[in-house]
Image (cartoon, rainbow, N blue to C red):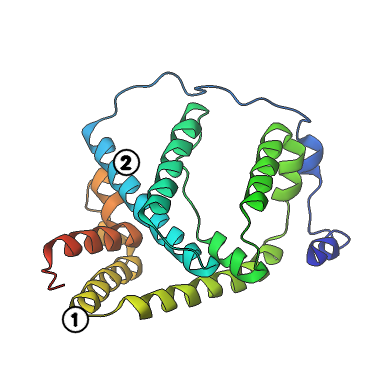
Amino acid sequence: MVLYLVAIPLGLADFAVVAKAPWFRLPSVLPYGSFTWPQTSGLITVLVFHLVAAVYTMSITLALCRMLGVEGTERRVRGAVAADGLDSAVAALFGGVPLISYDQNVGAISLTGVGSRFVVAAAGAILILMALVPKIGALIAIVPPFVLGGTLIFMFAMIAAVGVGMLADSMRSQRDLLLLAASLGLAMAVDFAPPALFEALAPSVRILVADGIVVGTVMAVVLNLVLPNKD
């Protein structure tokens, strides 16, 4: 907040965007037309990405449970995944993209120590207000990148620290090490590969194999099903 206020007199915040934004606007239902059945390639892509999103949400939920000192029960994890699915369906009705629980939540709770569900509900109400009153959303959108970057540095560092702690508790066998090494190594290889390597592939295939998170998650799920578990 202090950096934001400092950036205003320096001319780093463009308030012309706020002036142009309307005071009130209702979202449109199905702004891009009615529902149509997608092509097979598009359907497979969406299903794979939602599988990745589900795994992503489960990992975040377990990390939050660990931080808050509550048990990461199956009911909690299933509830988080179901909530993301319901939110994505509602967002699609208003022309939005599928929603997902971001790992910034882990970093924010780590930094502030606040994990109350009432705070989360209040934040949700603010987001709804921002959608209905575009001037408020524009006021947030003009925050200079360096202001957000300074906060995100610590947030993502906290996320990494929590993740390392979870991995340290979970790596109990050679199978776990192999699963982590294979999925992480393949994901990093895809992310650092030159983009020209994937240009020969069809767009429907490229969108799947050119994303390290997708490839790593699918690899982890497949290995978890295939590798024998002696436990």
Disc 1 residue crowd, few under 14, some 14–19, many 20+, Cα 10 Å: few
Q: Which residue is mark 2?
A: 46
Task: Name the element at disc 2.
Answer: helix
Q: Nearer the viewer, residue 193 or 41?
A: 41
Which residue is most to the top?
34
Q: Is residue 75 left or right of residue 122?
A: left
Which quarter of the figure has residue 182? Answer: bottom left
Q: Nearer the viewer, residue 46 or 221?
A: 221
Which quarter of the figure has residue 223? Answer: bottom left
Residue drawn at x 64%, y 44% as measured from the top left: 124
Which quarter of the figure has residue 130? Answer: top right
Task: Name the element at disc 1.
Answer: helix
Residue drawn at x 79%, y 66% as measured from the top left: 3
Residue drawn at x 19%, y 64% as measured from the top left: 224
Disc 2 residue crowd, few under 14, some 14–19, many 20+, Cα 10 Å: some
Q: Which residue is mark 1?
A: 174
User: Residue 99: x and y, percent?
Assistant: 47, 44
Q: Is residue 41 left or right of residue 141?
A: left
> Is the residue under label 2 in contact with that under label 1 (CB below 8 Å)?
no
